[in-house]
Amino acid sequence: MDKIVFFHMNQLGDLLFSLPVVKAAKQELNAKIFSVVKTSLAPLLTASNLVDEAMAKDRNIVKFLKKEKVGKAILFSESPSSLLYVYLSGIKSRIGFNTASLSFLLTKKTERVGVPSLFNNRELGFAVGLKSIRQDYVGIINIPEENIENVKKWFGDNNLDASKTIAISIGASKGRQDKCLEEHKWIEVINVLSEKGFNCVLSGAVWEKEILNSTAKKCRIAPKVFAAENGILDSAAFLKKCGLFMGIDSGAMHLAAAVGTKCVAVFGYTDPSQVGPMPLKNHIVIKKEKISDITSEDIISKVLRLQYNNKD
């Protein structure tokens, strides 16, 4: 049996962009599949039965890949360390993007157009020889029953109707703060929608809990805060349960779209045609060249119009 290793990027959205390629490899190749992935994101791959083993990128990875005699590496990651690990592991077939910083170590290259995206990843998958790679990531993630029950309990404990709940994600990672909309605009959105009967919930990772609680206290009707205490699969279960997702261009937005929840997504300089929630036609995008030009009314009007249309 052949053995393949995927090297993934560290951001949640970028991982989700890689899932259709991994799924195609699982279906089309008679191979044992490994993934090198950020530890906190690995459960998305293992719970969905996409890989035989997921592991962190550390100093033990070379020894592991040598022992397993992996024959092919597919690199979504363009980091120098990823390419060095693959090269030092003695893997004969090394396939990645021509924009990688050590691309001369690759045995086969494919062009990357623009930013990391599903389009680019599909081209990489086709270069590997895969035939049927999906054009979106919806329905690939499998959420274990344990996480679904965690979220059901949370909704019950907080006496909230999930179908009337809007998950609101306002934060971004430290390196991507320029994607964020000002806090006071989100507070106004929450104030208006709460007064109109929506259950607004500020959602995020555990490390965001303090910031989310601080924002909640500034609202006229303080929203509940959902911080995924049990990791990324609780986040996935929560977003799937909610009636709507609202937030910036982020990993949370992509996770919501991947589990089938409609998104109202706010974009500044990034291009929704490349990195928008998928499939784009199923979602609502609010885009201006400067995210600071987007107003609270821009967001509120889209949500209320959506509610009106759903009653027709």
Image (tube, grey):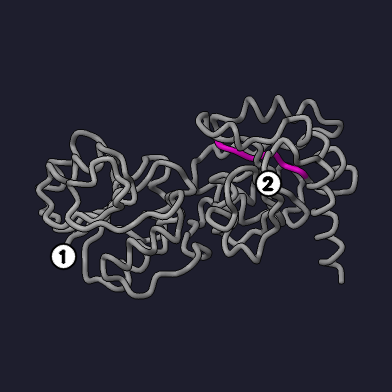
The amino acid pointed to by label 1 is: Asp
Q: SS at mark 1?
A: strand
Of the 4 image quadrants, the one containing the C terminus is bottom right
Q: Which residue is mark 1?
A: 2
Q: Position of residue 188 (x, y in %)?
A: 83, 36
Q: Which residue is mark 2?
A: 266
* Left or right side of 249 for 163: right
Q: Position of residue 42 (x, y in %)?
A: 38, 47
* Left or right side of 161 for 19: left
Q: CA distance from mark 1 to mark 2?
A: 43 Å
Q: Main secondary structure of the magenta part?
A: strand
Residue shown at the point (47%, 45%) measured from the top left: 12
The amino acid pointed to by label 2 is: Val
- Whichever of callouts 1 and 2 sits on the residue coming sooner in the sequence is 1
- What are the residue bounds of the magenta stretch? 200-205
Of the 4 image quadrants, the one containing the N terminus is bottom left
Q: SS at mark 2?
A: strand
Q: Position of residue 296 (x, y in %)?
A: 81, 40
